[in-house]
Amino acid sequence: MERTIRKVPWVTGDPPKVQEHFNAALYDALNRRFFERYELTTAGTGTLTEIWSETLPTNAVWHVEYVVIGRGTSAAARAVYRAEACVYREAGGSATFEGAVSTSLSRESVAGFNHDLSVSSNDVVLKVRDDGVITVDWQAYVYVLELRA
């Protein structure tokens, strides 16, 4: 089965060139911050599936905050998660959490649903999981603040 992760512009309705310019200008104006929305459908696999990942630059610190929303396509199933973490990468090192990921909201109507923020080599990775039965439409809203040397 092939999965598709779709990055969705968070300002909709603009022509692509205007959108591209707006996002670049917004990123610069907000002093190395970015916010994006991602969509993914999982087909009842019961496994953690990547919905977002980014490579953490060398000599950088990120504050990563996200909200994940899931809704079952053929059953009364839903989930909402909100969490944040501090992630850093020093010269010659890999992405590392400073402390634990802090989850401020975790609600699901189906016990098998879940989310996970992890690091892998130089990447920060967000994954979602359905219950192994229900097909779920997921959206992840990811907000990153960055400080670089």
Image: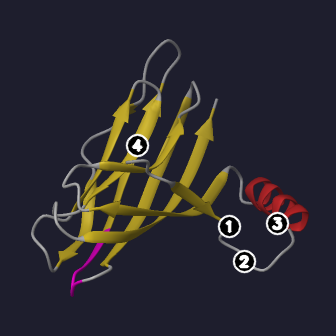
Q: Residue 19 carries which label?
A: 3
Q: Which of marks 2 and 4 is nearer the N terminus?
A: 2
At label 2, which amino acid type do we have? Thr
For the C terminus, the quadrant is top right
Spatial separation of the CA atoms under disc 2 and disc 4: 25 Å
The percent position of residue 25, horizontal first and vertical second, equals 83, 59
Rendered view: 140 above or below 75: above
Report crowding for label 1: few under 14, some 14 to 19, many 20 or more residues within 10 A (C-alpha).
some
Query: Among all residues in the image, which is located at the extreme left?
Result: 111
Residue at numbered disc 4? 125
- State how far apart marks 1 and 3 are (Cα): 8 Å
Classed neighbour count for the residue bearing mark 2: other residues with Cα under 10 Å, few (<14), some (14–19), many (≥20): few
The quadrant where residue 20 appears: bottom right
Magenta-colored stretch includes residue 52: no
Give x and y (percent) for residue 28: 78, 53
For the record, the magenta segment spans 75-81
Q: Do the residues labelled 1 and 4 touch (CB within 8 Å)?
A: no
Q: How far apart are marks 3 and 4 (CA)?
A: 25 Å
- Which of the labelled discs sits on residue 9, or is there none? 1
Q: What residue type is labelled 4?
A: Val
Are circles 2 and 1 on residues that touch, CB within 8 Å? yes
Q: Residue at x 89, y 67 (%)?
A: 18
Report if residue 124 is visible in the image: yes
Answer whether residue 78 is magenta in the image: yes
Amino acid at pointer 3: Gln
